[in-house]
Amino acid sequence: MNHYLKQFGIWFAAVIVCIVLPLIFNSGFSRSMLSQMGIAVIFALSYNMLLGQGGMLSFGHAVYYGLGGFLAMHALNWVGEGWPVPLELVPLIGGLGGVVAGIVFGWLSTDRAGTTFALISLGIGELIAASALMLPSFFGGEEGISANRMVDTTLTGFRFGQQIEVYYLIVAWMLVCIALMYLQTKTPLGRVANAVRDNPERAAFIGYNARVVRTLQFTLAAFFAGIAGGLFAINYEIITTETVGAIPSGNVLMMTYIGGVGHFFGPILGAALVTLMQLTLAGITHAWLLYFGLLFVGMVLWAPGGLAGLIMMHEPVWKAGLMSRLLRAYAIIAVPSLVLFLGLMTLIEINYHLSLSVNPDELMSLFGISFKAQSPAAWIVSLALIGIGFFFFRKAQRVVRRSWNEVAQQMKGAAIQ
């Protein structure tokens, strides 16, 4: 029993959390956000099959997400007209559409990795986005295609009129896709994809065709992206040409990188965080894209392993029972970091108010305080917060570095003994 709990406990916990979450956060907004997180998790993990496992930096992964979504939307309309396919299996049709596109475009673009692959993926993305408006019979033109997900043919008996029913459908597909993508990392193909990523010449020397391996990996990633697109179609009941454009491709890249490409669970964290930011910050400030960009730049500069890398970096410290020393150092650096961020945020919000508000002369409100954006005092305070925060942040960095060195030395000494 303990053996099974140790091996599968994390999966049981994930299922329970997914079932309970919409019962705790039971508002329409929360359930809609959780549904979008589920779709984003599949999309980001499929992207990580390219970037994390295969070393293929793609700027056009939304092509397979969008094509799968459009095909699923057409299938949904056919189901509504009496096609004998249960609605629960419609995302699989989107996945098969992704497979067909993945084979064609994958074979064209995977002869070489690196910059060549990235540029070809960008070109294919732009090609499909431009073609979408010229093929209105499939893409629906600028208006897109809509459908009604409340059909008679279902496996579960749900009518899918309520968001919670759609949420459980998305979660079921998400858990299946996560399990399949995780198992794929343990297969010979998953291992060889890592070898081709790290050293394609050596992989070719021992008999593996790098292009075939990349194409297979690419096609599987397109399959899961197509499933995510199919779930998107069911969730929103409308899909437009923007789905195959550059913005979703950029979003999934940032989700994956912020979460961490080096660990399987990294894109799950990134998808959840970025979806949360997109849905909550957008309602609070017009500058949310700027904060999102700052977060991405910060992760690239100071935490290239992403959130998952930060977590795993602390695992040996946690096991050694030395986290308390680091927590003290983190608490010390958290204060000037917060001051620095408040100063930057105040400066950004003042500039946005002066640039984008209808009447820049009216009072603006920040943290419950109303003031005029043109007031010298507001500028002086924000610049002072930035200066003070930056000064003490630099000092606190030394404290964190010294604590890390002490902890590392202690763990090294314990390992020698």
Image (tube, helix red, strand yellow):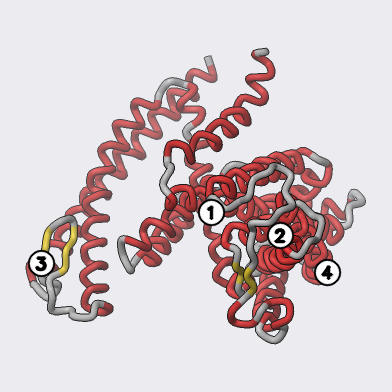
Tell which circle, 3 or 4, labels the residue nearer the N-terminal end: 4
Q: Residue 269, how many percent across, how many down? A: 52, 45
The picture quadrant where one finds residue 350 is bottom left
Question: Which residue, given by chain and number where applicable, does mark 1 sit on?
Answer: 36
Does label 4 or label 2 sit earlier along the sequence?
4
On the image, the x and y values in percent for residue 373 come to 14, 72
Q: Return the residue at label 4.
A: 104
Give the Cα separation between the discs numbered 1 and 3: 37 Å
Of callouts 1 and 3, the N-terminal one:
1
Label 3 Cα crowd, 10 Å radius (few <14 / some 14-19 / many 20+) = some
Relative vertical location of residue 197 with respect to residue 171 in this rendering, above or below: below
Instruction: State which mark lies toward you, 1 or 3.
Output: 1
Residue at image mark 3: 371
Label 1 neighbour load within 10 Å: few <14, some 14-19, many 20+: many
- Counting from the top left corner in percent of width and height, residue 349 is at 24, 67
State the mark number for residue 226.
Answer: 2
273 relative to 135, above or below: above
Left or right: residue 112 compared with residue 14: right
Instruction: Say what secondary structure mark 1 lies in.
Output: helix
The count of marks equals 4
Q: Which of 17 and 184 is in front in this view?
A: 17
Q: Which residue is drawn at 73% across and 81% down?
A: 137
Question: Residue drawn at (57%, 47%), measured in percent from left and top?
Answer: 167
Q: Nearer the viewer, residue 63 or 233?
A: 233
